[in-house]
Image (tube, rainbow, N blue to C red):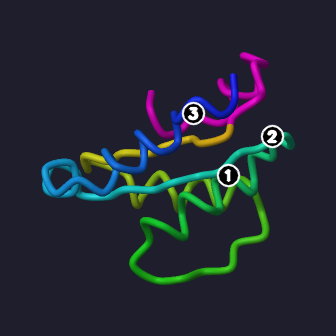
Amino acid sequence: MGGVGKTTIARILYNDTRVRDHFELKAWVCVSDEFDIFKISETIYQSVAKESKQLKDLNQLQVALGEELKDKRFLVVFDDVWNENYDDWENLVRRYWK
């Protein structure tokens, strides 16, 4: 359900100093209607990487992102999500959270 303030509350918490101090890395991803694993992964990578790389291959991007997240406490907020397809989400998180 849109328009009830979920993003506003999430943004307040995301920017809270206690949250900022608790996580080594943070990323905010606006997913919207089109669920594009490459774009989502690229947004997370650009938020957490120390250096900017233009990776054009999904596998290379996921490997690089996995290295950035390895052994770190991180927070990723997925905003404006309308996709309920379990397989899409499983494909996205398979390398990072398992």
How far is disc 1 from disc 2 in space, using C-alphas? Answer: 8 Å
**Foreground residue, 59 or 17?**
17
Q: Amino acid at mark 1?
A: Ile
Residue 40 numbered mark, or none: 1
Image position of 75 with respect to 2: above or below: below
Q: Amino acid at mark 2?
A: Phe
Image position of 31 with respect to 6: above or below: below
Where residue 31 sits in the image (x, y, percent)? 71, 45
Residue denoted by label 2: 35
The residue depicted at 65 percent of the width and 62 percent of the height is 42
Point out the tag, 3 or 2, that comes first from the N-terminus: 2
Q: Amino acid at mark 3?
A: Val
User: Which quarter of the figure is the N terminus placed in?
Assistant: top right
Q: Secondary structure at mark 3?
A: helix
Residue 66 numbered mark, or none: none
Range drawn in magenta: 81-98
The residue depicted at 67 percent of the width and 40 percent of the height is 80
Residue 96 magenta: yes
Point out the tag, 1 or 2, that comes first from the N-terminus: 2
Horizontal side of residue 22 vs 89, given as left or right: left
Residue denoted by label 3: 93
Image position of 7 with respect to 54: above or below: above
The residue depicted at 45 percent of the width and 27 percent of the height is 98
Count of numbered tags = 3
Where residue 7 sits in the image (x, y, percent)? 52, 42
